[in-house]
Image (tube, helix red, strand yellow):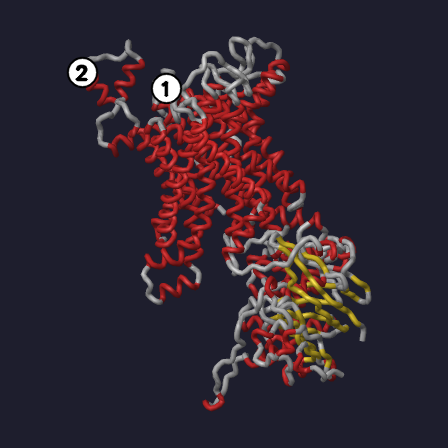
Amino acid sequence: MKVYFLKRFLELIPIFFAISIIIFVIMNSMPGDPLLQMRMQNPRVMTNDPERMRELREYYHLDDPLPVKYFTWLKSVMTGDLGYSSMYKTPAIDLITSRLPNTLILTITAWLIGLVVALPIGILSAVKKYSAFDYTTTVFAFIGISLPGFWFALIAIIIFSVSLGWFPVSGMATYGITGSWNIFIDRLRHLVLPAFVLGLVQVASWVRYIRTSLLEVLDQDYVRTAYAKGVPDRKVIIKHALKNAMIPIITIIALDIPYFFGGALIIETVFSWPGMGRLMYNAVISSDYNLAISCLMFLAIITLISNLVADFLYVMVDPRIRMGRKGA
Amino acid sequence: MERILEVDNLKISFKTQLGRITPLDGVSFSLSKGETLGIVGESGCGKTITAFSIMRLLPKNAFLGEDTRIAFRGKDISTLGKEELQKIRGKSISMVFQEPMTSLNPLYTIGWQISEVYRLHEGLSEEEAMTRSVEMLRLVGIPEPKKRVTEFPHQLSGGMRQRVMIAMALACSPELLIADEPTTALDVTIQAQVLELMNELKDKFSTATIIITHDLGVIAEMCDRVLVMYAGQIVESGDIFDIFDRPMHPYTKGLINSIPKIEISKKDQKKLSVIDGYVPHPSSFPDGCRFRPRCPMAFEKCLEKPPMIESEGHHSVRCWLFEGDDV
Amino acid sequence: MPKFLYRRKLDEIEGKSRPVHINSYRQLVWAKFKSHKLAMFGAFVLVGVVLFTVFGPLFVDAGYEDMDFSYLFSPPFTEGHPFGTDELGHDVLVRVMYGGRISLFVGLASAVITTLIGTVVGLLSGFYGGLVDRLLMRFVDVMLSIPMFPILITLTLVFGSGIMNIILVLTVFGWMGVSRLVRGLVLSIRETEYVMSARAMGVKNGRIILRHVLPNVIPIVIVSATLNMSYAILAESSLSYLGLGIQPPMPSWGNMLQRAMNYILGTTTGVNPWWLTVFPGFFIFITVLNVNFLGDGLRDALDPKFVSES
């Protein structure tokens, strides 16, 4: 098993390099000269002096050949130095780490909501294939994957915040609330709409996937063997089928974690949630190249980690991988 | 001789999005205690569906015919409810399937899978069930059963997995064993071993057995009586000597003739004989005699549906050529 | 419950289903597609939407820039403005129609381009295999697991906005999903006996790809194209909503929603112009939904092994 992990981890290293190269290429393709950029955003601090400019160019390795630039950049990324945000005038890494917890709160809650809703519905749909329940669920699932996330969010705000007034329109907290219980409730109220919107959109694709996975397993020979042995229906589904279906389901649920970050970007923007997604959006809107690239790099690393997490979970469930695939 | 199984006018239809398909049309046969019945035919003739329908292992969109009756030890099981059916499956009637590679659950040890039958039907505890499972493994000729019992299916070879399947099926000493192409997916040498094992065990437990196969060699090895099926119907039935020595139906003759024979002298060597044409799909069975388009002996009467005509010694055939031969 | 037959007898369905007579693959595909109710519905609605956006403007005098100052922020069904107007008096219906043209065009173009590139890459990679294939696919796998949307918005920094640029943004990485699907299929086709015998007979690789592999890959390509299109429409509207896609004054369903967001809490006169949000978004939703229905129906119809229970 350790061999398996080592192998997977080593496989990710060249991938990491490839991705970093791509991100680097994107970064370098961005129009505009960084020094001019800095000058435009900080006219008082930046000089016009050509001599000074040349020194700065050397300091920032701006005129080095591309490979050198790449490795310098990569080195600083690996040591945690993600550069400076021209918009916020703070190191990018600080901005990201300060917003990350907010995004995590949102993402994890949405993920949990998604799981709790999708799993039972998906399983029931498969078990009651072609029934009215299944048909309705399928239609809702289609609706879910076709809804533009931001539109769903806007409609939700119009209905629940503006018309009904149940939840606040935006932000993560209200200013000026005192008392820990009140603060907790206030935070919760702010969390509900964005988390549900983010989670429910994911539910749609998960429900279909869970249904398909379970159906595929139910079609397998060993399930037929279980029925032939006289095992009662419920036991066949839970003990024989579900356990096998869990393998692909767990993989997808773990691998989808990065998508929550992606979806969070839009949701955070609509709800003005102070998270990493909104940070990235602000970066792009104000052409803060460095910050945008830093966020992207961060996302890439999170993705690679969740790949490893998925591998880990996969191993836990499937004895064939655990034992290194002996036998015929 | 007690009649273990009586299948009467078995008709199965499937309701699909494209309409109704009837792959099985009026199959009738019976089986006595200790007897071994072979069902032979090409792929798509309905033999597997016949096997599955006894224990009703067919999908939800399958429907039984109006007058269909499946009597196990005298009682009609075709109308049994879910719970009663589950009591019979694995205990009184068992099945062995074609693909040992995929018929065992990859996530449970083989010991667990065999003992499941004991826990379910005989109410044994986990320990007792496991002990019995080890015994069964020994019985089916798996070496070091105590060790094997904790292994997973992927750690066993195809032949061994099939032995495990047999162990699972015979665990509760069922009265009827249905084997669907039990050796088709195995290597030839392993085939022989498994067949020998099956012969031994079915005599030992005096289990009535149904063997589904397309391989006439297997039939010759194992069976007392044979049913030849084509396009959802039985076209000939009799004991194995009748079928092999005096085949009546042109299809049966064609099957027997197409067994390659190794001839010693050159003058005995002939070209491999084949049956022209293809097996029809259930959505387009021919009218009248279903074998007519491929039959070298077809004549005008064949446009009508031939009934089963019983000849001497319980040798029956569904063919107009034998009209008037009935006993 | 699957795999379980109860006591039902034939007379229950005797009257309700007719026997089957199918003679060719094409008949089979068409019959399966026709019986897929959602797909038929989807196809029908999509045709409606396309007609609406493409030919609708011909029936209206107004352009999407025309401002009707007497009717600012009017709700739907006001005289001359079935979908209402926005803050500058633009007619929402007209804007939805023109916006539709843009959104549909971007969606279709991206889908076609990504599918073409993806198919070619998948075909070549799968067929020729080797180290390049393995590395490429592993790379594609991981790239695909990175959330696409943040990548897209970063790409707008590189390419800028506007119709052509957005199409570019969507296609740069959009071909990867298709290529993986195609490559998977090509791998299994490559190992089939008829391809192996063709190779053994010395048939040139190119010919094998064209005559044996490609026809079998086409069903999955068609289905991928529809999925890509629905994703492209959603992505374009999201980008436009964020201000990174189609820029005003050119309308797109997405950027109409961006303007609508400014008034979500109500206007200065206390009106809640919900129609500004509802209509464009609804059209995005309807289009994508029906493209998805269509794709699902196509997938079921084109899959040779799949005949569903009814």
Q: On the image, numbered disc 2 is attached to which residue? A: A50
Is the residue at mark 1 from the same chain as the one at mark 2?
yes
Q: Which-is-in-front pick, marks 1 and 2?
A: 1
Q: Secondary structure at mark 1?
A: loop
Residue A123 horizontal/vertical position (percent): 63, 42
Q: Chain of mark 1?
A: A
Q: Please state which of residues C102 and A162 is positioned toward the viewer in this rendering.
A: C102
* Relative height, residue B173 to residue A153 (above, below): below
Under mark 1, the amino acid is Ser
Determine the residue positioned at 36% across, 48% down.
C120
Q: Chain of mark 2?
A: A
Side of C261 relative to B88 (left or right): left
Residue B81 horizontal/vertical position (percent): 78, 54
Determine the residue positioned at 31% across, 14% down.
A41
Q: Please state which of residues C91 and B154 is positioned toward the viewer in this rendering.
A: C91
Q: Quadrant of residue C238?
A: top left
Q: On the image, numbered disc 1 is attached to which residue? A: A286
Side of C107 relative to B141 (left or right): left
Residue B140 horizontal/vertical position (percent): 65, 67
Q: Please state which of residues C41 and B117 is positioned toward the viewer in this rendering.
A: C41
Residue C256 horizontal/vertical position (percent): 46, 22
* Relative height, residue B109 to residue C53 (above, below): below
Q: Secondary structure at mark 2?
A: helix
* Relative height, residue C205 to residue A125 (above, below): below
